[in-house]
Image: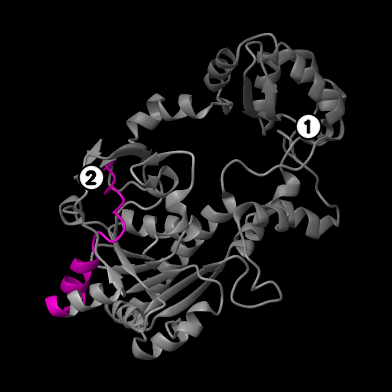
């Protein structure tokens, strides 16, 4: 799919958040991911960057023109302004933008915007209906609030990293940036909840999202197991704490298959399919409770049985029996696969300068409409003048003065 880079034409179809304006003062991944979701859903997102551009524009190894593919992957569907927050004129522009927007999302360290006079505390006095989402590493309070934070640091401190990796090996970082992405998603959830409340009360709200909190929330049943038993779980490897028949198994062709046989019916079908029918009546494996107690015995038997055939063959047979199973795919297989292609989960973005990039699309589909809103990420300062004029009502003379002072910048 190819999509026009003009936000007004590309958003001709009404979307759930159409009519809402979002001021995006975020960078890197957690905040930009969240604001991109809002843009995907139809909100008009106005992203502010410094004249040098946010640092993620220069993350190697892949670039299109001067912009990194990293940056392009999370900044579609946004207008772009350059505003210098070191200049008072730039701060006044931001204040006016807040007054013209419904939502602000930012990921400055706690206290930074307060010192600049553009915090929620200050600006909500002028606009009580503003919804303000702050995404930080550790939240707006607490002993760690001023610490810097990056995804792997959060994975480590939250305990999630201690669960990830081979059971007898070192802890490893999850390949997906869970700390960043979960914070962006929880931020959007908070924003949507605050919008509903504002529809009822007319009042906005400050949403305090901490990456650390989000990761701890995602510990889910593992946290509950520890809080109940006092036993500290270790690295999970490719298995499951509760089901020895729920795991990853190497196969004949060197690939691996994941099988999630977590009911008695599935266990019996699995054993029959693997040629291990005798295990069904074995007292050591009668129920999952016994199988879990004898995990060290049953797991080698399963591992050996799976080596008899190729991964896809096992997957086909297991699915036919109603047992959830899947080959451990690499990204080339996943992104070119029939289901992903059918669901239009890969989109090509193009701009008026001939640049193009393929990215993953929004997974949110409405009324069987699979197409996604996908405008090519804006150039640095591409919409500065138009936002000042069309949204804030600045005159041509005022805009020229701001550009000359360096408080704002409009690209060619």
For residue 339, which quarter of the picture?
top left
Q: Measuring from the top left, give residue 182's x and y in whole percent.
A: 54, 55
Q: Is residue 156 magenta?
A: no
Of the 4 image quadrants, the one containing the N terminus is top left
Camera-side mark, 2 or 1: 2
Residue 26 in the image: x percent, y percent?
Answer: 44, 64
Residue receiving disc 1: 287
Q: Which mark is residue 351?
A: 2
Q: Is residue 238 visible?
A: yes
Magenta residues? Answer: 369-397
Task: Examine the image and state in which quarter residue 322 appears.
Answer: top right
Residue 138 horizontal side relative to residue 122, left or right: right
Q: For label 1, count other residues whose C-alpha is less than 10 Å away and answer few (under 14), some (14-19) or many (20+).
A: some
357 or 103: nearer the viewer: 357
Seen at 46% across and 71% down, the residue is: 133
In the rendered structure, are the residues bearing label 2 and label 1 in contact, judged by CB atoms less than 8 Å apart?
Answer: no
286 lies left or right of 15: right
Assign a secondary structure to mark 2.
Answer: loop
The Cα atoms of the two marked residues, 2 and 1, are separated by: 59 Å
Magenta stretch: helix, strand or loop mostly: loop
Rendered location of residue 300, percent (x, y): 81, 20
Q: Quadrant of the C terminus?
A: bottom left
* Residue at the far bottom in the pictured view: 125
Q: Say few, some or many: other residues with alpha carbon within 10 Å of mark 2 (under 14 / 14 to 19 / 20 or more).
A: some
Describe the element under mark 1 as helix, strand or loop.
loop
Q: Is residue 395 visible?
A: no
Question: Is 405 left or right of 299, judged from the image as shown?
Answer: left
Location of residue 175 in the rendering, given as x and y in whole percent from the top left corner: 60, 40
Instruction: List the single residue furthest toward the front.
Output: 404
Name the one closer to the observer, 148 or 185.
148
Indicate the quadrant where residue 165 lies.
top right
């Amino acid at each position: 799919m190819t999509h026009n880079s003009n936000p007004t034409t590309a958003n001709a179809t009404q979307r759930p958040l159409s009519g809402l304006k979002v001021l995006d003062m975020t960078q890197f991944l957690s905040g930009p991911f969240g604001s991109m979701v809002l843009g995907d859903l139809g909100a008009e997102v106005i992203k502010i960057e410094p004249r040098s551009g946010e640092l993620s524009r220069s993350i190697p190894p892949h670039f299109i023109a001067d912009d990194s593919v990293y940056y392009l992957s999370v900044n579609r569907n946004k207008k772009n302004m350059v505003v210098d927050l070191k200049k008072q004129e730039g701060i006044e522009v931001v204040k006016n933008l807040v007054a013209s927007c419904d939502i602000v999302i930012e990921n400055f360290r706690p206290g930074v915007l307060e010192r600049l006079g553009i915090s929620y505390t200050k600006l909500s006095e002028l606009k009580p209906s503003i919804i303000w989402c702050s995404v930080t590493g550790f939240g707006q309070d607490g002993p760690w609030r001023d610490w810097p934070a990056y995804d792997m640091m959060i994975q480590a401190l939250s305990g999630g990293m201690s669960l990830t990796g081979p059971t007898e090996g070192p802890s490893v970082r999850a390949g997906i940036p869970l700390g960043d992405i979960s914070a962006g998603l929880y931020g959007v959830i908070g924003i949507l909840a605050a919008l509903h409340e504002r529809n009822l009360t007319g009042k906005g709200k400050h949403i305090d999202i901490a990456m650390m909190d989000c990761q701890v929330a995602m510990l889910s049943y593992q946290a509950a197991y520890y809080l109940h038993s006092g036993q500290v779980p270790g690295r999970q490897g490719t298995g499951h704490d509760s089901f020895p028949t729920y795991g990853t198994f190497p196969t004949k062709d060197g690939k691996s298959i994941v099988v999630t046989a977590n009911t008695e019916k599935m266990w019996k079908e699995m054993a029959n399919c693997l040629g291990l029918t005798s295990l069904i009546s074995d007292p050591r494996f009668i129920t999952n409770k016994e199988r879990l107690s004898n995990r060290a015995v049953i797991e080698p038997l399963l591992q050996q049985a799976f080596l008899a055939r190729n991964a896809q063959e096992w997957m086909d047979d297991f699915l036919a029996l109603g047992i959830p199973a899947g080959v451990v795919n690499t990204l080339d297989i996943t992104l070119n696969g029939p289901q992903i292609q059918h669901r239009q989960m890969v989109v090509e973005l193009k701009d008026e300068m001939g640049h193009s990039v393929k990215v993953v699309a929004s997974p949110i589909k409405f009324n069987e409409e699979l197409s996604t809103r996908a405008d090519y990420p804006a150039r640095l300062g591409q919409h500065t003048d138009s936002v000042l004029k069309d949204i804030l009502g600045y005159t041509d003379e005022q805009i020229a003065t701001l550009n000359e002072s360096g408080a704002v910048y409009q690209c060619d």
